[in-house]
Image: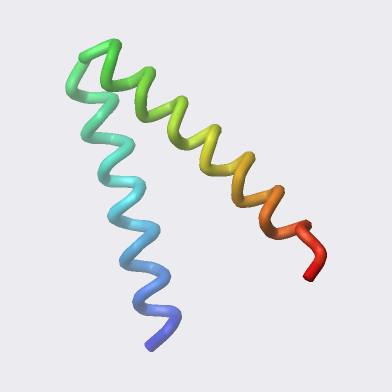
Amino acid sequence: MSKLVSLLYKAARTANDIETLLSGKPKRIAKRLKNKLVGRKLASKLYRFPF
């Protein structure tokens, strides 16, 4: 079940990336790219945070 949910989330994220690129709106593309980069930075910092 977990693998199915993970696969569906990944497919949804990919579909959203494709939809954003196909929209042709530079502001929307830049916002999506910025949010992905910020999210990755935050996630990596939180992952390394010692508890």
Which residue is at the far front? 51
20 to the left or right of 43: left
Q: Is residue 51 above or below residue 38?
A: below
Describe the colour scheme in one phrase: rainbow
Q: Which residue is drawn at 36% across and 29% down?
A: 32
Classify residue 19 by image quadrant: top left
Classify residue 35 by image quadrant: top left
Whole-percent x, y for residue 23 in the image = 18, 22
Q: In which quarter of the image is the C terminus?
A: bottom right
Whole-percent x, y for residue 49 in the image = 76, 59
Q: In this rendered view, identify the residue nearer to me: 3 or 45.
A: 45
Q: Which residue is drawn at 33% across and 57% down?
A: 11
Q: In this view, does 42 lie above or below 51?
A: above
Q: In this view, does 51 lie above or below 14?
A: below
Q: In which quarter of the image is the N terminus?
A: bottom left
Which residue is at the far left? 23
Q: In this rendered view, identify the residue nearer to me: 42 or 51.
A: 51
Q: How many marks?
A: 0
Whole-percent x, y for residue 42 in the image = 61, 44
19 to the left or right of 43: left
Which residue is at the far bottom? 1
Q: Which residue is drawn at 34% across and 49% down?
A: 13
Which residue is at the far right? 50
Q: Is residue 8 above or below residue 20?
A: below
Q: In this rendered view, identify the residue nearer to me: 42 or 15.
A: 42
Q: Which residue is drawn at 38% across and 18% down?
A: 30
